[in-house]
Image (cartoon, rainbow, N blue to C red):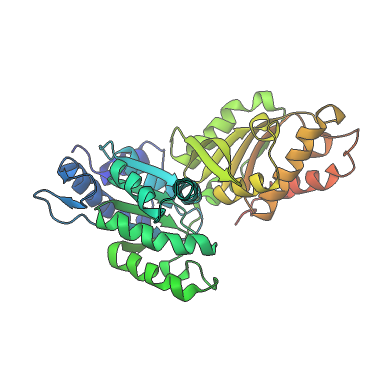
Amino acid sequence: MGASLTEIYESRVAAGELRADPAQHAVLPLLNDLRQWLQEHSAKRRGLLSGFFLKAPPAPGGLYLWGGVGRGKSMLMDLFVAHLDIAAKRRVHFHAFMQEVHHGLHAARQRGVEDALQPVAEALIRDLRCLCLDEMQITDITDAMIVGRLFEKLFAAGVVVVTTSNRPPEDLYKDGLNRALFLPFIALLRDRLVVRELESPTDYRQHRLEGAQVYFHPAGRSGAAIEAIWRDLTGGAPGQPLQLTVNGRRVDLPRFASGVGRASFWELCARPLGPADYLAIAGAVRVLILEDIPQLSAGNYNEAKRFVTLIDALYEARVRLIASAADVPERLYMEGAGAFEFERTASRLHEMQGAGWGA
């Protein structure tokens, strides 16, 4: 199997790519055991939907890793996925995953399928041996009613689930409508997954950015600095597109890894996106790197309005912002319709540069 995840982690610490953390280190053997089991038994599945394995012990349920923001949960998941040598694996943000599930349910209902969840589950089971869900959080009654049945089917078919969350299973859908109906799902998670808290006292995103420059101008000179921040926050991950579905439309974040999103101003503000789209992006990331914010004026008024809406969404969600721009915030939009209103955005951009922002 080659080097263990612990050995890979330690080599990256030695190379200066990661900071050593005892809590992260303690989780690696659990992930490595799952990795080893999956690689040893990946070819032993019998029957597409049987849920059993030939000459293999029952599949382990997986791991539920929870802890505070910025403790390294997503980084550990990315390390696991990157070194899991099987094809039938997927790593996806939980919000995006549930949007896909809802889309599949809608399509099944349109075809008149009596149990719309069945074809959705079958498609997942057919394609996956390991499903990795980042940042599980359940705030919607519809999601709460779906996940229990869906996970039962995944576990019965031997799909290994690894998930991260900011809260323990007992706090999922806390104070939600008809929460009593959700309690069996919490019991299922406890029964099938190893639940482990990542108890690191350090918020590594805040620690890495503490005292660091997070707003760069002029933008053209900041490429190397922005790239260095991306590598540091993601542990060198290349990043993959994050697809979110909002009100039936697809919203793409071009690069995403370890809770960090990255996009240019034009990728997020030149497209016809609205408040719901920016709220979804703000809910999906802990840090957003936004590059090449231009000088704003009446000539790009629509883009400027979207930028204001985006900053409002990030501000309310307390997302950490790393930005490169044509000028300092108060000189980005100096004349034309909307210049006066932009003063609040400029003030927020300054506030979001504070060392404690997002903590």
Q: Quarter of the image for the C terminus: give it.
A: bottom right
Q: Say if residue 19 shows up in the picture.
A: no
**Quadrant assignment for the N terminus:** top left
Asked whether residue 251 appears in the rendered view, the answer is yes
Which residue sits at x=33%, y=67%? 188
Q: Residue furthest bottom?
A: 180
Q: Residue at x 54, y 70 (%)?
A: 176
Asked whether, in this view, residue 70 is left or right of residue 347, the answer is left
Choose between 286 and 152: the one closer to the eye: 152
Q: Residue furthest top?
A: 220
In this view, the residue in front, 244 or 286, is 244
Viewed as shown, does residue 327 lie left or right of 78? Answer: right
Q: Residue 235's x, y, as percent?
A: 43, 39
Front-lying residue, 205 or 150: 150
The image quadrant of residue 268 is top right
- Compared to residue 138, the image places residue 285 above or below, namely above
Task: Note whether 8 is above or below 202 in the view shown.
Answer: above
> Residue 9: image x %, image y %?
32, 43
What's the residue at 80%, 29% (across, down)?
A: 300
The spot of residue 232 in percent (x, y) is 49, 39
